[in-house]
Amino acid sequence: MSLDLPIHVYANFTVATMVPRGSDSLGLIPAGAVVVQGNRIEWVGALSDLPLDYRTAERLEGRGRVLTPGLIDCHTHLVFGGQRIEDWRKRLEGVSYQEIARAGGGILSTVRATREASAEALYEAAADRLKRMLAGGVTTIEIKTGYGLDLENELKQLQVIQRLARQSPANVIPTLLAAHAVPPEYRERPGDYVDLVCNEIIPAAAPHCVAVDAFCESIAFDLAQTERVLRTGLEYGKQIKLHAEQLSRLGGARLAARLGAVSVDHLEYLDEAGVRELAAAGTVAVLLPGAYYFLRETQRPPVDQLRAHGVPLAVATDFNPGSSPLGSLLLAANMAATLFGLTPGEALQGITIEAARALQLDSSLGSLQSGKRADLVCWDCTHPLELIYGIGAYPNAAVIKDGRLVAGQLS
């Protein structure tokens, strides 16, 4: 690190390092300090142990407030056109998600709106959503495509995501989800659409995305089709992920684990055999309680089994217009604890270090450790579990991305 880069000492904070120590899953340091030089963390520890070299550096006084890593939302669909209020109204009247999808609603209604929207309109709407999430402490976010479902519009979504990455302070991770649903023009020939995804869309999108995802479900793609998509992603050097076992048990999670998926998401219908395969593969389970809540599901993911087998548990918003219009990652963490049975500590890990693991970014993000990127959030509260406990009224946040204040105020 160049010696001429500025050094800041965040002093007298309750520091939640997210590096577990014994029974302390949060790695708490009361009266702690974090030293930042440029865009990197240089030192973390008790203020009383602050090395002499840093004692004359500029101090930012915490006065007992909480300092956490920047939050990480590892599963969103932030770029889309339109809204799905009519779908929601029908579900409240008793129509199932699957029935709405088969009638041409659901994902396909968002596909129509996204295809019709200009790239500029999609960008403006997504940029506003991202700005609000950044203000809520989210410094890294994964954004999926999946509302284009043809070459032109999947690339349009990726272009919008790349523009967000350039123009927002947030760290934006693009994922290709062309295998999200069978588009209406391929309704009677889904195999031909899988041909298009594998032969044209993935090759064209590969330079512009980090990962390839798919939706393995009775209303989307079967195991054989899913395997072809994921294997094609691997051929192009991409990470692979999967929406699996959300509405039924098709075995997608086991398939994804065998192929080396970095994460498998939803998992309400996952069985113990699938849990074991995720554990053996080191695949992260991403829990999406917003969709569970909004769709009024009753089948919970097998959290006890996932925990018992040591499967990493991440939590995300699944922000999308149809099944999880949830813009608060802290509320998603509260839901993961309240609805799914995570401990509050696990829920906070799920939106920091485990979410980083789900994006294969845990070597540089997700915890407060020397050498990692200086993504920090200063919260106006006295204990980090207040972040999980609250519903709707959250502490003011000062958000630091790569060592720079990008939202809120430090005072």
Image (spheres, rainbow, N blue to C red):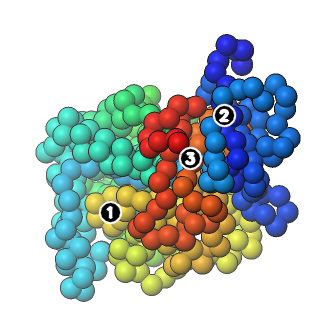
Indicate the secondary structure of the residue bearing disc 1.
loop
Q: Are marks 1 and 3 in contact (CB under 8 Å)?
A: no
The label number, if any, that marks residue 151 in the structure image = none
From the image, state whether disc 2 or disc 1 is nearer to you.
2
Query: Residue 390: horizontal and vertical position, in percent?
Result: 50, 70
Q: Amino acid at mark 1?
A: Pro
Q: Is residue 314 above or below residue 298?
A: above
Residue at left offset 82%, top offset 37%:
50
The residue that disc 1 covers is 325
| Marks 2 and 1, the one that precedes in the sequence | 2
Query: Which disc is residue 59 wearing?
Result: 2
Q: Which residue type carries mark 2?
A: Arg
Quick one: 43 or 283, which is closer to the camera? 43
Which residue is outermost to the left? 116
Q: Is residue 42 visible?
A: yes
Q: Which residue is mark 3?
A: 377
Give the image location of residue 358, x and y in percent: 59, 51
Question: Which tag, 2 or 3, sits closer to the chain's start?
Answer: 2
Residue type, label 3: Val
Q: Crowding near pointer 2: few (<14 within 10 Å), some, many (20+)?
A: some
| Disc 3 secondary structure class | strand
Q: Helix or strand or loop: what does disc 2 sit on?
A: strand
Residue 93 in the image: above or below residue 146: below
Quarter the N terminus occupies: top right
